[in-house]
Image (cartoon, helix red, strand yellow):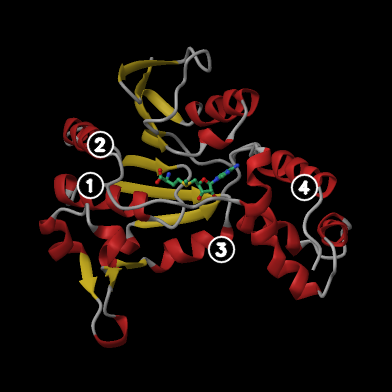
């Protein structure tokens, strides 16, 4: 099989930028060729240029999703950036006696660890008060994993012991080394495929939105558009959490920073 040439790589850079808003630096060339190699094998093609023709030629429309799945990075784990979950708990406690469901969105949920971490916090502090958690991601393959809620235990080292006992089932026998999110909690979280780089569907308004560790892949222009779309789904006074390595400087004036990586909509 051929290695990927600079011009072939540039085609995939453009494809993923136009589709998902993701900027792939030149340093990602090896990573991209490695991830797409299995699609060349699948179609028995001998060049990345031929695969690009399949991808964009309209004869295999489902291939676009497959390529997006392969070109996105889904690194995540439970209770990543713990401070945001403390903030979520505070907001949920404040909402306890307010009317209506407390609604939270994990806007680039990857395989679901973020959304289930949120659900553990809300089940703990809101119990019978109405609450909803919604997770979304551009990758349909990763959302299939999120819906199943079955993980290697290494991802779970930040789950507080009491939550592990209450919300997770430890795998035994063939499943040892894994954990399954308990059915009741799983049923409180819904997932749906959403591309943040396009007009968002009707989702209602949220009290808290996590938009974490996805903007790092976006150009400033894409970031501005995505943040505007996401903030439009936040209730007035609602809270937006972004990744610690991300910033909203010069990106939006509709939210004010209340702590590093935590913003409030006016
Ligand atoms: C590194 S993971 C972050 C997961 C989680 N939010 C966290 O902080 O642990 C980034 C996720 O963003 C998703 N993503 C990338 N571009 C996207 C887009 N345009 N719309 C929606 N999700 C996107 C990827 O599929 C990936 O699952």
Instruction: Give the residue at mark 2.
Output: 88
Is the residue marked by circle 3 packed among few (<14), some (14-19), or many (20+) residues within 10 Å? some
The numbered mark, 1 or 4, whose residue comes first in the sequence reads 4
Q: Are marks 1 and 2 in contact (CB under 8 Å)?
A: yes
- Residue 244: give x, y in percent of width and height: 36, 31
Instruction: Give the residue at mark 4.
Output: 9
The numbered mark, 3 or 4, whose residue comes first in the sequence reads 4
Q: Are marks 3 and 2 in contact (CB under 8 Å)?
A: no
Q: Is residue 43 left or right of residue 158?
A: right
Numbered disc 1: secondary structure: helix
106 vs 170: above or below: above
Give the image quarter of residue 38. bottom right
Whole-Å distance between the Cαs marked 1 and 3? 27 Å
Whole-Å distance between the Cαs marked 1 and 2? 8 Å
Whole-Å distance between the Cαs marked 3 and 2? 28 Å
Q: Residue at x 34, y 48 (%)?
A: 132
């Amino acid at each position: 099989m051929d290695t990927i040439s600079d011009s072939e790589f540039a085609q995939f850079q453009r494809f993923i930028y136009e589709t998902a808003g993701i900027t792939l630096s030149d340093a990602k060339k090896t990573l991209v060729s490695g991830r797409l190699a299995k699609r060349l094998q699948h179609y028995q093609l001998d060049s990345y240029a031929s695969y690009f023709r399949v991808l964009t030629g309209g004869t295999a429309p489902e291939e676009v999703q497959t390529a997006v799945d392969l070109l996105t990075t889904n690194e995540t784990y439970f209770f990543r950036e713990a401070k945001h979950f403390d903030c979520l708990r505070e907001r949920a406690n404040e909402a306890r006696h307010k009317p209506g469901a407390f609604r939270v969105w994990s806007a680039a949920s990857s395989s679901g660890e973020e959304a289930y971490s949120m659900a553990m916090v809300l089940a703990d502090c809101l119990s019978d008060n109405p609450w909803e958690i919604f997770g979304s991601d551009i990758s349909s393959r990763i959302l299939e994993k999120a819906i199943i809620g079955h993980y290697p235990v290494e991802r779970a080292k930040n789950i507080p012991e009491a939550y592990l006992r209450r919300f997770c089932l430890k795998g035994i026998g063939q499943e040892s080394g894994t954990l399954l999110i308990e059915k009741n909690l799983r049923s409180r979280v819904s997932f749906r495929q959403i591309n943040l780089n396009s007009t968002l569907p009707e989702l209602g308004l949220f009290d808290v939105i996590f938009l974490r560790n996805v903007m790092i892949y976006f150009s400033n222009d894409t970031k501005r558009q995505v943040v505007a779309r996401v903030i439009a789904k936040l209730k007035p006074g609602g809270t937006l959490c972004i990744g610690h390595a991300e910033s909203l400087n010069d990106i939006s004036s509709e939210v004010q920073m209340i702590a590093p990586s935590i913003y409030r909509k006016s």
